[in-house]
Amino acid sequence: MEPTRSLTFAVLTLGILAAPLSARGVRQLDGETPIAPHQSIRIEFPAGELRLEAADADTLTAALEIRCPQDRRLEDCREQARSVELNTSSSGDEVLFGICGLPRFHLGNDSLSVEGTIRVPRNHPSAIEMRVGRLEIAGVNRTLTARLKVGEIRTELPVEPFGNALLRANIGEVSLRAFGEDIEGRRPSLLGGAVTWSEGPGREDLHLEVSVGEVVARLAESDHGLR
């Protein structure tokens, strides 16, 4: 990364990403919802840190914690957190999982954040939209789309299901490694980056995008092939 681009990237992301690291837990949010064999999954997540994991199950399970920043009174955070709830709906071919009761826009160090893990059935297409923070994804076998406003996306996925991948950062960095080799990207703008790849053995699509931040994807051969 060139010095100018590195400095710009750091300035734009460091302050926003630092807040959740020192936050304190004020409320637990746990939930479970069944996923039918024909349904895809869409997740809408606010600011915070999320790990999305694939599981050999037919349910989506969430283990999340609402976090309070250090410079806010715990009682104020607890009062606000009481109105936060998980929101799940099923309509035809899609299940929507989200969190309601938090501000639409993340206001930096004064805002509540959410941290935890969501486990989804391994063989269902998934899409996730997240506002600010860190998103880790592991083990998904079907078409996956992830969009993040500000922060970083990191994935560790089996290469076998995927035939195509598109990684994009409007401002920031992208990195794709498949079959142990780094895939060369391009720069659609002075501060952005993109990588496209269409040499995978499978039929599924991978699309990872940040407005400001970093995308790192690793596609590796699984130990036991597809499950």
Image (cartoon, rainbow, N blue to C red):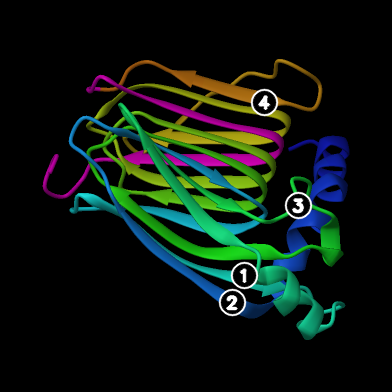
Report which residue position mark 1 lands on. Answer: 66
Cβ atoms under marks 2 and 1 closer than 8 Å? yes
> What SS does tag 3 mark?
loop
Identify the amino acid type marked 4: Gly
| Distance (Cα) linking label 2 and label 1 | 5 Å
Report which residue position mark 2 lands on. Answer: 27
Q: Nearer the viewer, mark 1 or mark 3?
A: 3
Packing grade of label 1 (10 A; few <14, some 14-19, many >=20) is many
| Distance (Cα) linking label 1 and label 3 | 13 Å
Residue 165 versus residue 113 in the image, above or below: above
First in sequence, mark 2 or 3: give its number.
Answer: 2
The quarter in which the C terminus is drawn is top left
Identify the amino acid type marked 1: Ile
* x and y percentages locating residue 41 in the rendered image: 37, 37
Q: Which residues are magenta?
A: 201-227
Cβ atoms under marks 1 and 4 closer than 8 Å? no
Report the front residue among 11 and 4: 11
Packing grade of label 3 (10 A; few <14, some 14-19, many >=20) is few
Report the front residue among 121 and 39: 39
Report which residue position mark 3 lands on. Answer: 103
> What SS does tag 4 mark?
strand
Identify the amino acid type marked 2: Arg
Q: Residue at x 67, y 36 (%)?
A: 173
